[in-house]
């Protein structure tokens, strides 16, 4: 083995142990979904019952199939406005037809003791109504990002869950993903030195004429906003969980091609900066019209760390650059969807506040409103 190879192997192992160390911290149990043993698969007593509300692209392609890797969560009910689709999926997932609801009779889910947790995967502006109705039906709630389309709605959701004595968690899957957890652990350990700067970019082509899931994304009433609310939120949230700080000031510019029919109601390109109390700065972008990008880079005094992608569903890469060279730690990919859902189930079972509660969702919505305000005024906004 030559010195480059041995260094690479050492760095790979270092990466793995850092990941293990990261996972040994708070929330470790939820971080990686290991293959299920037969005992766990059969022991449904350890699993809470989940209802999925909204059987769209993300629910059917990512969330529902990933219950198979959950240790503490099982899918037991569906809520949909399309009876044929719901019936077909219920059959596929072995769900009792009596546990299939529509948006009108959704409230009767309160009489279904098999359902402990309701997962809201609807267009953004519908999150508030269904979270509140779920809490009033006596169910705990996991709600997709962005939490809602206004701060008022976020507060109403938090209040409704508090009043009902139910947990509310926002589905920030990256905060349950091994590469991101490893990066957080390295930063906390001081491996990068003092954090000075973060860059984060999220972009993809939105295609409402080709993809049904993009139709509501360009409608302000349902989406609340454009690329910022949908994917810029990953850049914003990453800047916060990587620094471990809350921003104190934001600046922003927004530009959408006035001749592009997709952007009559919502924005396309957003460039925003965040200033944190330590002096760290984040420079973030989001766009609905550049090639798929999901990346983040953290610049510390001693090293930089790249995550590219930072927020993919199944694949991540890390690179670290120091004065004496670069390394690419390999960390075992984990099922972030299963980890996230199990964290919610465990929070309920152990009566603990989830790591990404409603208040976390509210903060991002507040900062996004400040970003819109800063862009509109052409001035920085204190938050
Ligand atoms: P989608 O359009 O595929 O699904 C939305 C579902 O809501 C559909 O089943 C649709 O029938 C239903 N619906 C009910 N009333 C509706 C109405 N008035 N208009 C439109 N649809 C209505 O969208 P999606 O991509 O699955 O996104 C749903 C939610 O999940 C959004 O909040 C989105 O931000 C979030 N999401 C999160 C991730 C993630 O990685 N965490 C990824 C994609 C989407």
Image (cartoon, helix red, strand yellow):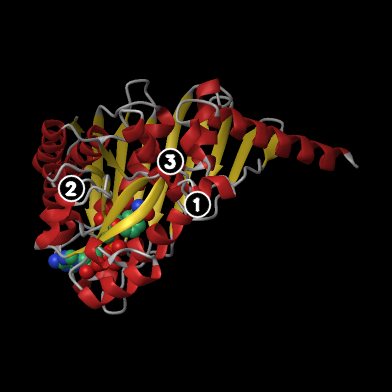
**Is there CB contact under 8 Å for labels 3 and 2?**
no
Secondary element at image label 2: loop
| Residue at position x 33%, y 61% in the image | 59
Distance from the alpha carbon under mark 3 to that under mark 1: 13 Å
Is 44 on the left or on the right of 250, as rendered? right
**Is there CB contact under 8 Å for labels 2 and 1?**
no
| Residue 308 x %, y % | 53, 50
Q: Quadrant of ligand 1?
A: bottom left
Residue furthest to the right: 1
State which tag comes first along the sequence, 3 or 2.
3
Q: Which residue is mark 1?
A: 69
Mark 2, other Cα within 10 Å: few <14 / some 14–19 / many ≥20: many
Q: Which residue is mark 2?
A: 148
Q: Which residue is mark 3?
A: 46
| Residue 219 x %, y % | 15, 65
Using the rendered image of the protein, determine whether residue 227 is visible from the camera's viewpoint.
no
| Residue 46, placed above or below residue 277 | below
Is 57 on the left or on the right of 216, as rendered? right
Distance from the alpha carbon under mark 3 to that under mark 2: 31 Å
Please state which of the two labelled residues, at mark 3 or mark 1, is closer to the viewer. 3
Q: Is mark 1 within 8 Å of ligand 1?
A: no
Q: Nearer the viewer, residue 164 or 363?
A: 164
Q: How many marks?
A: 3
From the image, which quarter does the C terminus lie in?
top left
Secondary element at image label 1: helix
């Amino acid at each position: 083995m030559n010195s480059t190879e041995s260094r690479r192997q050492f760095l790979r192992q270092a990466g793995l142990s850092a990941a293990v160390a990261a996972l040994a911290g708070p929330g470790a149990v939820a971080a990686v979904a290991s293959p299920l043993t037969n005992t766990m698969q059969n022991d449904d007593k350890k699993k809470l019952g989940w209802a999925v509300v909204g059987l769209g692209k993300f629910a059917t392609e990512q969330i529902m199939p990933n219950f198979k890797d959950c240790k503490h969560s099982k899918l037991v009910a569906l809520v949909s406005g399309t009876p044929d689709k719901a019936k077909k999926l219920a059959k596929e997932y072995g769900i009792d037809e009596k546990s299939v609801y529509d948006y009108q009779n959704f409230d009767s889910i309160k009489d279904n003791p098999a359902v402990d947790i309701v997962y809201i995967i609807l267009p953004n502006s519908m999150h508030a109504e269904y979270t509140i109705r779920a809490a009033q039906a006596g169910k705990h709630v996991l709600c997709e990002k962005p939490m809602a389309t206004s701060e008022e709605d976020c507060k109403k959701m938090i209040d409704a869950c508090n009043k009902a004595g139910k947990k509310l968690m926002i589905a920030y899957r990256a905060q349950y993903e091994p590469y991101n957890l490893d990066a957080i652990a390295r930063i906390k350990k001081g491996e990068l030195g003092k954090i000075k700067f973060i860059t984060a970019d999220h972009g993809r082509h939105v295609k409402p004429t080709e993809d049904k899931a993009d139709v509501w994304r360009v409608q302000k009433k349902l989406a609340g906003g454009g690329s910022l609310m949908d994917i810029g939120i990953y850049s914003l949230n990453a800047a916060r969980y990587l620094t471990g700080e809350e921003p104190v000031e934001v600046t922003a510019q927004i530009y959408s091609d006035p001749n592009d029919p997709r952007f009559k109601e919502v924005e396309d390109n957003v460039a925003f900066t965040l200033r944190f109390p330590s002096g760290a700065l984040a420079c973030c972008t989001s766009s609905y019209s550049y090639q798929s990008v999901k990346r983040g880079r953290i610049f510390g005094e001693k090293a930089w760390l790249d995550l590219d992608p930072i927020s993919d569903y199944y694949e991540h890469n890390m690179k670290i650059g120091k004065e004496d060279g670069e390394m690419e730690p390999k960390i075992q990919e984990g099922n972030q969807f299963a980890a996230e859902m199990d964290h919610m189930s465990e929070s309920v079972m152990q009566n603990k506040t989830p790591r990404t509660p409603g208040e976390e969702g509210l903060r991002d919505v507040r900062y996004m409103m400040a970003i819109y305000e800063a862009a509109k005024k052409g001035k920085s906004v204190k938050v």
